[in-house]
Amino acid sequence: RQLVEIGRALSGLDPGLDVVVLPPWDCLPYDRASPSRDVMGRRLSALRRLAGSKGRQVLVIAPESLVQKLPPREAINTVFKLQPGLALDRDALFAFARRTGYVVDDRIDEPGEIALFGEVVDVFPADAPAPVRIAVDEAGLVSELKIYDPISQRTEQTIDHLVLGPASELIWPDEADEERPSGAEHRMAQVYGRLTDVFELLPAARVSQDPLFGRRLDESLAQVAD
């Protein structure tokens, strides 16, 4: 909550500043459970902005996120792009969804879910506040992209493109057929080999910390050690 509040305040003070908020995982270190898909989606979206920005930028980050290893750049930049008028390869879309942590469901009401209904694909991007309905015509072209309310199913807004990011920080290899086990993200180093961190993404950044940063960092590292 504090991260979001600081981010909003900075954006209000300087609308021309690109304020990026990187939330920590919402689980314990080395837990048996994975972080939530919406947290991982928002984290990867933030990391893509950090890696691709050329302008003035501020990163708001908690100690837990600062010391946590991150996926390599190729995983951070993994996306699936959709646009009306372009062909939709459904097999490629669902292969992307499987590799990047999306869950196939009949009712799409949480980030990181996807469903196929005839000529329509519903997907809830992991970094978005609402799901998107992808309408496909007889020629296999995307005819419409609509943001909709998952409860009422009513369309709220038509969009001209969609950049679908991963729902997991562990991108499954193309050839992997096994199910994604719970807590798999805690073993990212075994899949990726070398991981990166915030300091590699922002080698020239200037750092400022609040008075409680050190204490919270010590508490975070104690959890890791435990």
Image (cartoon, rainbow, N blue to C red):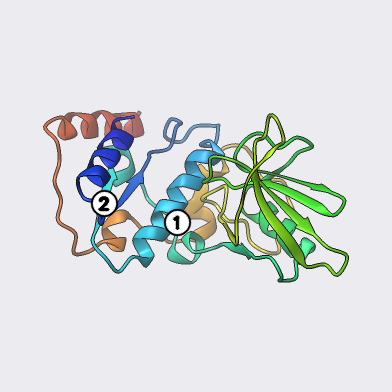
Label 2 sits on residue: 15
Q: Which of the pair 194/80 is nearer the observer? A: 80
Where's the C terminus, which quadrant? top left
SS class, disc 1: loop
Residue name at image x 60 percent, y 61 percent: 160
Residue 67 visible? The answer is: no
Residue name at image x 88 percent, y 65 percent: 138
Q: Which of the pair 97/11 is nearer the observer? A: 11
In the figure, is residue 226 to the left or right of 167?
left
In the figure, is residue 211 to the left or right of 194?
left
The amino acid pointed to by label 1 is Pro
The amino acid pointed to by label 2 is Pro
Q: Residues within 10 Å of mark 1 (few under 14, many from 20)?
A: many
The answer to which quarter of the image holds residue 65 is: top left
Residue 71 shows which numbered tag? Answer: 1
Looking at marks 2 and 1 on the same chain, the residue that comes earlier in the sequence is marked by 2
Tell me how many marks there are: 2
Q: Position of residue 42 (x, y in %)?
A: 46, 46
Where's the N terminus, which quadrant? top left
Q: Position of residue 155 (x, y in %)?
A: 68, 42
Residue 75 visible? The answer is: yes
Q: Position of residue 5 (x, y in %)?
A: 29, 33
